[in-house]
Amino acid sequence: MSFALVDYFEPWWIQIIKGIVLFAIGLQIVPLVLLAERKLLGRFQGRYGPNRVGPYGLIQPLADIVKLLGKEQSRPETSVGPLFIVAPVISIMTAVGTFAIIPFGDAPHIFGTRVGLYGVDVSIGPLYIFALSAISFYGLMLGGWASGSKYSFLGAMRAAAQLISYEVSQGLALVGVLITAGTLSLTQIVHAQEGMWYIVPQLAGFLIFMVAAFAETNRAPFDLAEADAELVGGYNTEYGGGRFASYYFAEYLNVVVVSGVATTLFLGGWLIPGWHGQPAWTDPFVVLFKMTLFISFFIWIRATLPRLRYDQLMSFGWKILLPLATLNTLATAIIVVAVHK
Amino acid sequence: MTYLIFFIAAIGTLAGAIGVIALKDPFYCVLALVVHLISLAVLFMLLRAEFVAAAQVVVYAGAVMVLYIFVVSYIGGQNLSGSAGPGRAGTLAAFACAGALVAELFIAVLGTGLKAVGTGGAHVAAGFGNPESIGTLFLTKFLAPFEIASYLLLLAAVGAVTLARRRGGLDDGIEQRAPRISVAEFMSARPYYTGTQHETLGRPESLPEPTQR
Amino acid sequence: MIAAALIHPHGPYIDWAALSPLVALVGGSVVVLMVGLLRSRFARTQVVPFLTLVSLGVTIGFVIWQWHRHVAAISGALAFDQLTGTITLLVAAGGIAATLLSWRGQAPRESAHGDFYSMMLGSITGMVVLVAAQNLVTLFVGLELLSIPLYVLCATEMHRAASLEAGLKYLIVGSVGSATLVYGLALIYGATGSTDFSGIAGSISQGHSSDVLLLTGIALLTVGLAFKASIAPFHQWTPDVYEGAPTPVTAFMAVATKAAAFGVLLRVFDVMLPAEHLNWRPALLVLAAISIVVGNVGALGQSSLKRLLGYSSVAQAGYILAGVAVATTLGARATILYLVVYLLMNIAAFGAIVARERMTPYGDDFDAVAGLGAEDPWLAWPLTIAMLALAGVPATAGFIGKFFLIDALVGAGYTWLAILIVVGSMISLGYYLRVINAVWMRSAPGPSASAAAGVPVIAGGSPEADALGQTHIELRFAAVVFGGATVFFGIVPQPLFDLAQHAANTLSGAL
C-alpha cells in the first residue's frame, strides 16, 4: 500500500485493533476535555465548577452524555430531512478521520510485531488534514442550511467563512515546517525535530498556526459562529439530543486533533529533549501530556479573551495573518536554500 | 476490497455528475458536484495518486465549491427562470448534439485498446505521483507551465478585483461604503462601548461616566 | 524511498536571452500594475499606457534581437523560433494598436488603468506562450492565460450592460471551448502516452495513427481552438462579444487572438499531428468553407460596424483556416502572410471606428461614419482602404493575402475551396461597399439628430471627460499608419513574403 510511507507490513488484524484503540482513545479524551474545560473555567472565574456528580464531579461528563442521548430528537418543520441528519455525521467523521494520522509514537515492536503507534502515516501528511478539514466544512454548512432557520444559517455561514479563511493561513504556516523538515510524513517530521523542536526556528509559524487553530476550531475568541448574543447558538441551534451531541463531540475532538497536530509539528511529538534512550512505551504518554498542555491553553484563552467582531475576524485573517504566514514561508524557503547551498 | 471501493466511487462519480445537470434546486446541484469531486478523489486514491487526491479535495471541494455554496445558499432557491429557454427545436438539437458527442466519446474510449498505454496500465516507478515526484516535475520538466500558471493566478486575481471593486464616482451613490478597519485601528485600543473586556471588567474607575442621551 | 537526487533536483537551464520577450511582457505587466496604484492622476492615465507601449516595444526589440535563434527553452516547454517570433511581433503590434486606441478611452478609466493594461499585457503573454508551447500542458496554460484576462477586458465598461454581457458571454462560451480543448488534450495523451508535441508525433508515426481515441482527441482539440479563432459553427459568440466589448478591446481580440489562435493551429497540426493529416485535413477544409459562407452571409444585414467586423472576422478566419488545412509550406506561408495583412487592415478600420465613436453620438452605427469623407478625410481614407483590403481589392495588402491563399489551395488541389474564397470575397463586397458608400456618398446626419440622440451609447460616453470633436491624434495615427501600411504592402509585398517565409520555414521540417 503506497498510501502510507512505511517500510514494514502490518497484518490486517493489527490495523483493525489500532483503529478500535484510537477511536476508543479519542472517545475517552473528549469527555475528559469537557470536564477539564468546565472545571478550569470555573477556577478561572473564581468558582468551583461541577462537583456534585461523583467524586470531585468526575462523573459529570457521563451524566451530560446520558442526558443528551436521552433527549428527544426534534427537528424543525422547515428543515431538510436527509441533509439535517447527515450533517452531524460528516462533522464527526472528519474529526475522527483526522485523529487517525496523529502519531503517538514511532513503530516499535510489540510482542514481536512492528506496530506503528498511529492510525496511518500518510505520505501527504498535513494535506490529509486539510482535505478532511475541507470536508468538515460541509458538516457545518449543511447542518446550518438544512435546519431551515435563519440563526442556524447565519451561524453556518460565519463558521464556514471563518473555516476557509483561516485554513489558508494555517496551511501556509505549516509550509515553513515542511520546508525545514523536507518531508510530509508526520513521523518523519517528528524525527527531524530530534535536534531542536520546530517551535524554536518556526516560532512565527507556530504562533500563526495557533491563532488560525483557534479560528478553525471555532473557539473563543473566534467563536463568532456561536455568538449567542447575536445568533442564539450558531449552526447547531436547531439540533438536540444525540445529533447535537455529535456536533459537540466533533468540536471537542477537533480541539484535541489540533493539539495533536501542533504537538507533532512544533513540539517534537513524542521526543523528550536530551533523553536519547527513551523507551517506546513512554511515547504515547509524552504525546498525550503535550496535547494536554495545548488543550489547557485553549481553555485558558477561552476564559481570558472576549469575542471579536465579525469584520475584525475577517480582516485580521486576511490582512494580517495571511501576509505574515506568506512572509514566514518565504523567509524559511530562502534560509533553507541558503543553508543547503 | 479495491474493486468494492472502485465501484462505490465510480457510482458516486457518475451519480454526482448526473445530479449536477438533472437536479432542479441549484443548492443540490452544487452538492452533487461535491459528491462527484470527492468520489473522483477516491478514484485518484485508488490509482495511488494521493497528492492529486488530496489536492482535488482541498482545492475543489474545499475552496471552489465552498464559494459556490455561499453564492447559491445566499441567492439560490429563488425561481431563476427569468428568460425563455431555447425553443423546442433548439432543445432537441442540443440533445442531439450532446448525444452524438457521448456516442463519439464512447466509441473513442471503448474502441481504442489504449494501445499506447496498454491494458495493464502504465508502468510507473515506485513513488510515482507522490508529492516529491510531482514537486520535482514542477521544478524541472514542467517549470514553464508551473510559473506561467502562477502568473495566470495573479492576473485572475487582478481581473476579479477589477470586476468586483467598488468604484467611486461611477456608481449612482446609493450604495454606502462599508466601514473599513485599518491595521493600525485594529491593533489600537477599542473606543468605549464596543464590548471590550477592558470595558466590562478592567478598572472601572478609569472609565468616564457615560453621557446621558 | 525516493532517491536523494529527487529531493534536491536540479532546475533546468534557463536561456534568458531566448526568454527575453516573455520577460519583457511579464515584467511590463507587473510594473504597469504597480504604477497604476499611484495616486497621481497623470501617472495613472498617461504613464501607464506609455509604459505599456514601452514594454511592447522592448518585446519587439527582443524578438528582433533573437530572430535567428531557434531555442527550446525551459526543458523544451517553449520553442522560440521564427514562428513564435512572427506571432509575437503580430500580437505586440496588435497590443500597441489597442493601447493607442484605448489611451483616452472609457474602458481603462472605468477599470483602473493599471489593471486594464496589465491584463492586456498578460493576455499578450498568454498568446506568446500559446504559440511557443511545445507540450500539451503549456498549451493549455497559455490558452487560459490568453483567455482569462480577455474575459475581464470585455467587461471593463461596467456602466454599459452590453459590455458586461459580452464579458459573461465570452466567459461562458470560452470556458466551454477550454473544456473541450482540455478533454481533447487528455484523449490525445491517452492515445499516445506523451504530452510533448514531438513525443506525440513520434508515437503517431510509430503506429498509433488512426486510433479512434486519438482522432476524437484531435476533433475536440480542433473544436476548442475553433472557439478561440471564431471559426463557424463555433462563432456564435463573436458578433455579440465584438459588439458589446469596448471597441479597443474588440480590435485587440480581433487581431491578436486570431493571430495566436492560428499560430497554435499551425503548430499543433503541422508539428504535432502532421502524420494524421489525411484525417484532419477534410475536417478543417469543411470548417473553412462553412466559415466563409456563414461569415459573409451573416455580415450582410448588419447595421453595427463592430458586428459587421465580427462576422467579417468569421469569414476571414475561414480564409486563414484554409491555409492551415492544406498542410503545405506554401499554405503555412499564406496563413502567416494573411495574419499580418489581417492585422493591418483591421487596426486601420478599428482606429477610424473608435475615433468616430468618440466624435459622434451614434456609437458604432453606420450613421457614425456617414459623411466622413467630406468631414474628415484622414479617417475616411484609412477606413476605406481597410474595407477594400478586407474585400481583397487589388493594390491593397488584402489582395496579396488572398492571392497567396488561393495559390496555396490550388497548388494542393483544392480548387473548389479557392473558388469558394473568391465567391465569398464577392459577397463580402456587398457589405464592405456599404461602409464605403456611407463614408463617401451619404451626408452626415443633421445636428438635430445628434441632439436628439443625446448621450452616445458607446465608449467615450461622458462628454465632459471626452469632448466630442477632440482631435484624437493617437487614433488618427494608428488608423493612418496601419492604413498606409495596408497600401504599401499591397504594392511592395516583398518584406511580408520574407517574414512569412521565415516563419513557415520553421514548420517545413515537419511538413
Image (cartoon, coloured by chain):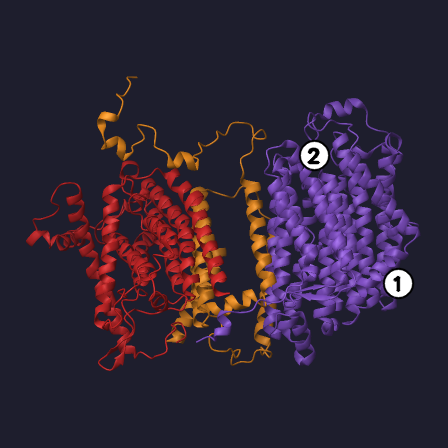
Nearest the camera: B166 or C275?
B166
Quarter containing the C terminus of chain C:
bottom right
Q: x, y (%) of residue A223?
A: 30, 44
Q: In which quarter of the image is residue A8?
A: bottom left
**The residue marked by circle 2 belongs to what chain?**
C
**The residue marked by circle 1 belongs to what chain?**
C
Chain C shade in the render: purple
Same chain for marks 2 and 1?
Answer: yes
For residue A74, side relative to residue C318 (left or right):
left
Nearest the camera: A70 or C340?
C340
Disc 2: which residue: C458
For residue C355, side relative to residue A25 (left or right):
right
Q: How far apart are marks 2 and 1 (CA)?
A: 41 Å
Q: x, y (%) of residue C259?
A: 74, 55
Q: Which residue corresponds to the image point at 47% horizontal and 53% vertical from the top-left?
A: B64
Q: Which chain is red?
A: A
Q: Which residue corresponds to the image point at 38% horizontal and 51% vertical from the top-left?
A: A204
Chain B shade in the render: orange
Q: Which residue corresponds to the image point at 74% horizontal and 32% vertical from the top-left?
A: C358
Nearest the camera: C120 or C29?
C29
**Upstream in sequence: badge 2 or badge 1:** 1
